[in-house]
Image (cartoon, rainbow, N blue to C red):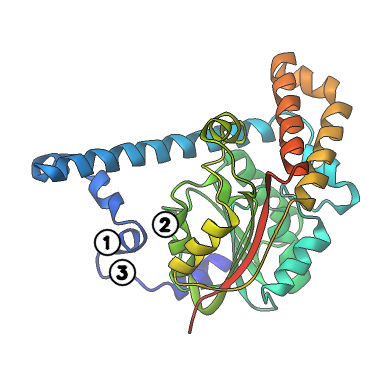
Amino acid sequence: MVSYRLQDAETRPSRPDQRTAAFNPAIQLVASPAIVEHRAVGPAAGLVNELRRHMARSTAITSAVERFYDQVRGSGPSLTALAHGARSIGQECALTDSEIAAFARRAGLGAGMVMLDVGSGQGGPACYLACEFGCRVLGVELSSVGHAAAEARARQAGLGDRVEFRQGDMHTVDLPAGGFDVVLSLDALCHIPRRAALLRRCAQLLRPGGRLAFYDHVERRRRSAAERRSFDPLWRFAGLETPASYLRAVATAGLQVVWHEATSDCLVRFYSGLGDAFLAERTNLEAVAGSKRYAEGLERLRLTHELAAAGVIGQLGCIAQKPG
């Protein structure tokens, strides 16, 4: 089983909390409020309170993302499947099946490798890439609905020996350090708070010479703070990076960028297809979600397509290698 081989690859920390501290030391402060309150005096108290507020915001965002995707995935037909049509493999990102395969190939994915899929959704890309490349895949997904669908997909495809899924938060789920040849994510990192800490953890999970490969929503043209506050919560984004800030964060995590591109083309195509599917499925969607939520969803898609078409938002595709 995948889980057995991955476990064998794990290097155990010398202290129980060392793995967590390696990528976010602040967690240790917030995890033990009684100790912090006892020791934090003077200027340190302000820092501790700020850390608490930061972690509370992070927890709230994570919970909102989980509820959002549980709700979306339980609200009738898969609109992403309708949007992609014949190019659907069960993905929930803007890339088509052939674009996902080409991206994985560019990242160096090959037979016998072990890949981590961050934000694996309902398991479409994980199962597809396992079949196409002969690799083993471990997917991590926050949504319980998505996780259950992914496990069912792998069983139905007979991939139980090559594809495994775990439900949890990428910041805390137990994963083997240095256990992956490729860490892949497709339009999912934008939903995960504490992006710098997340990228550091991805680097930690890669073997020396392994590669992080992601496409993610980004802000390509500067928006005002008010525009961010009004738009980002519609999709439960934990804030959008710019291409430049993302590349800096990747480098700061200790990875060497070997390829990148910033584009809005895939998002324009994707949200146009989603809008068409939303209109075509109006009767079914209103029956499940109600007319108010349907109208809100349609407006969200209209606005997102408008911003993508104007080049305000887009995607950053990035491949970065861990030295060694």
Q: Quadrant of residue 23?
A: bottom left
Residue 47, position as x, y percentages in the image: 22, 44
Residue 13: which numbered mark, if any? 3
Left-right relation of 115 to 82: left
Residue drawn where x is 77% and y is 54% of the image: 95
N-term mark: 2 or 3: 3
The residues bearing labels 1 and 2 have C-alpha atoms spaced at a distance of: 19 Å
Residue drawn where x is 78% and y is 17% of the image: 287
**Is label 3 in a helix, a strand or a loop?**
loop
**Is label 2 in a helix, a strand or a loop?**
helix
Residue contact at pointers 3 and 1, CB within 8 angstroms: yes
Residue 127, position as x, y percentages in the image: 72, 60
The residues bearing labels 3 and 1 have C-alpha atoms spaced at a distance of: 7 Å
Does residue 265 lie above or below 105 as drawn? above
* Type of amino acid under label 3: Pro
Residue 308, position as x, y percentages in the image: 74, 43
Does residue 289 lie above or below 152 as drawn? above
Left-right relation of 56 to 84: left
Is residue 90 visible in the rendered image? The answer is no
Residue that mark 1 sits on: 16
* Type of amino acid under label 2: Ala
Residue 197: which numbered mark, if any? 2
The residues bearing labels 2 and 3 have C-alpha atoms spaced at a distance of: 18 Å
